[in-house]
Image (spheres, grey):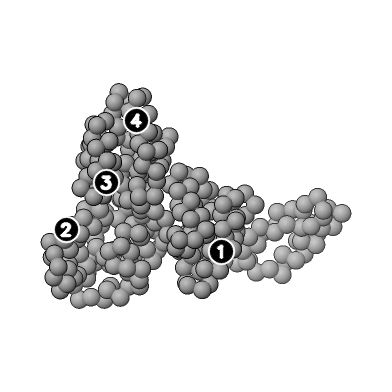
Amino acid sequence: MAGSVRFLAQAILLFVPLSSPFSFLGSNNRGTFLLKVTGDKFGETSQSARTGPGPDSHILLQQLYPALESYQEEYGHPNIPLGSTAGRKCESLRRLHIQNKLSKEDVELLDSMGFRWHSLEDVYRAADFYELFYRLTEYGKVNDGEVSPPKKYGADPELGAWVTGIRRIGPDSIPDDHKDRLNEIGFQWVSNRVCGSAFMKQYRLILQQIDDAEDDNYQKNAWLEVKANLKWLKAQQLVHQQKSLSATRVHYMEELLGMDWENGSLIEHPFVGIAGNGLGDTA
């Protein structure tokens, strides 16, 4: 039986163009012949072509996916607001992502839908402060009292992101009791691991330019007339079009310019020249 199935599959493949994304794998124990989708023709793999969660997907994603699809169909994106059961589950998905508890395939599926992940600041706002504070003190106990885990802390990814988020928000913008507790354990508000990425340097510079404008709406938009800023903006748009911009950076761009920042409308601005370098850095 298996031999006849193989013969049938090979006969079918005689009529499949060489550029076809199919190749013969064999047959299963029920006699069904198996073809592999290679993605050579369409520029994508069988996994990236997946249209929904697989059997190995996280159970929360399997439960939430119908609601994500329905919301995306109605509103054009899957980011359900927090004030609903599905919205709260979206927040749980974002936390699972920070904790590295979603598979690469699940993350790619959600990315393809336009699902918004937490920024590092959001990690602080969404988490239970005292739970993460306890984990930070436990970190200090095994690190000679030092309470500065790296941003990408493999043993506890959420803790590293939480600490980085607090620093970005700053001591003047969090509740006093949070600030006091952190000060009591010698928390460093400026990390010794200073972020040197070109992205974050320019992003902070633009935020400072906007803050300096105070309440003058015209001046608040004046940063768009600065050649260096527009080069930076163009660079982020181009990287995003190539699907190479991290979810964190996409979030920052949306906070700066709104959800439609990536549409390229500013790329043709007369001040915009060749995009700058340093785009491979991580924020």
Q: CA distance from mark 3 to mark 2?
A: 23 Å
Whole-percent x and y of residue 212? Answer: 12, 61
Kind of residue at badge 1: Ala
Residue to which mark 1 is pinned: 67
Q: Earlier in the sequence, mark 3 or mark 1?
A: 1
| Left or right position of 183 against 39 | left
Helix, strand or loop at mark 3:
loop
Residue to which mark 2 is pinned: 208
Residue 71 in view (yes/no) = yes
Q: Which mark is residue 137?
A: 4
Q: CA distance from mark 1 to mark 4?
A: 38 Å
194 vs 135: above or below: below
| Left or right position of 72 against 131 | right
Q: Which mark is residue 142?
A: none
Helix, strand or loop at mark 1:
helix
Of 248 and 11, the residue lying toward us? 248
